[in-house]
Amino acid sequence: HAFGRTLVATPFAIPTISNAITSDDSQGISAVTDSEIGRAFRKSVVQGAQVADKLDEKWERLSDSLRDKSKCDKNTGRRLYDNGKRKDGTPIGNPGLGELCAPEPLMPLDVQMKDSILA
């Protein structure tokens, strides 16, 4: 019967004190982050992210330049930019909509309406 009482009481046991790190110095973390190798590692990570960002921007420009600028979506009246096709011919994702195919010029500002809205 003692074993049965132990199992019943186990979920209600008081938790022990945590062994979590309470400060950087207690585990030597500041020695790593302030070291030459720690700084060099963080610098290389940032530089790598910057290179990836620039590469992504150049790729986006290239892909934008290769798009068919005359292709227009008849439902929305906007340029349709597709994301390409898979090997089986199915489209990748939803196409993105660009600028208007035939943009309408803006009408002049109605000063009376503006004044009534701002009043």
Image (cartoon, rainbow, N blue to C red):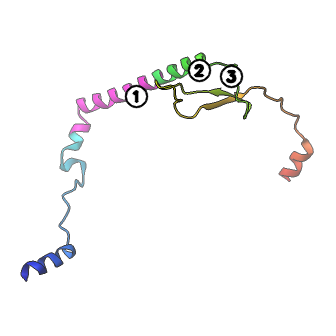
Q: Label 2: which residue?
A: 64
Main structural element of the magenta stretch: helix, strand or loop?
Answer: helix
Q: For residue 65: magenta?
A: no
Q: Is residue 42 magenta?
A: yes
Depth check, mark 2 against mark 1: the one in front is: 2
What amino acid type should be assigned to the residue bearing mark 3?
Answer: Lys
Q: Kindly identify the amino acid type of the residue bearing the numbered disc 1.
A: Ala
Which badge, 3 or 2, comes first in the chain's sequence? 2
Q: Nearer the viewer, residue 5 or 41?
A: 5
Q: Residue 113 in the image: x percent, y percent? A: 89, 47
Q: Is residue 89 above or below residue 28?
A: above
Crowding at mark 1 (Cα within 10 Å: few <14, some 14-19, many 20+): few
Judging by the rendered image, the residue that carries numbered circle 3 is 71
Mark 3, Cα crowd under 10 Å, few <14 / some 14-19 / many 20+, is few
Callout 2 secondary element = helix
Residue at image location 53% in from the left, 25% down from the top: 84
Q: Is residue 94 left or right of residue 22?
A: right
Q: Relative to 89, is 28 on the left or the right?
A: left
Could you give the CA–CA distance between mark 2 and mark 1, rounded to whole angstroms? 22 Å
- The answer to which of 7 and 74 lies nearer the viewer is 74
**Point 32% across, 32% down: residue:** 42
Q: Are the residues tagged 2 and 1 within 8 Å (C-beta)?
A: no
11 sits left or right of 54 in the view: left
Q: Which residues are magenta?
A: 32-54
- Label 3, label 2: how far apart the Cα atoms are: 13 Å
- Judge the density around disc 2: few (<14), some (14-19), many (≥20) Cα neighbours within 10 Å: few
Q: Secondary structure at mark 1?
A: helix
Residue on which the image places disc 1: 49
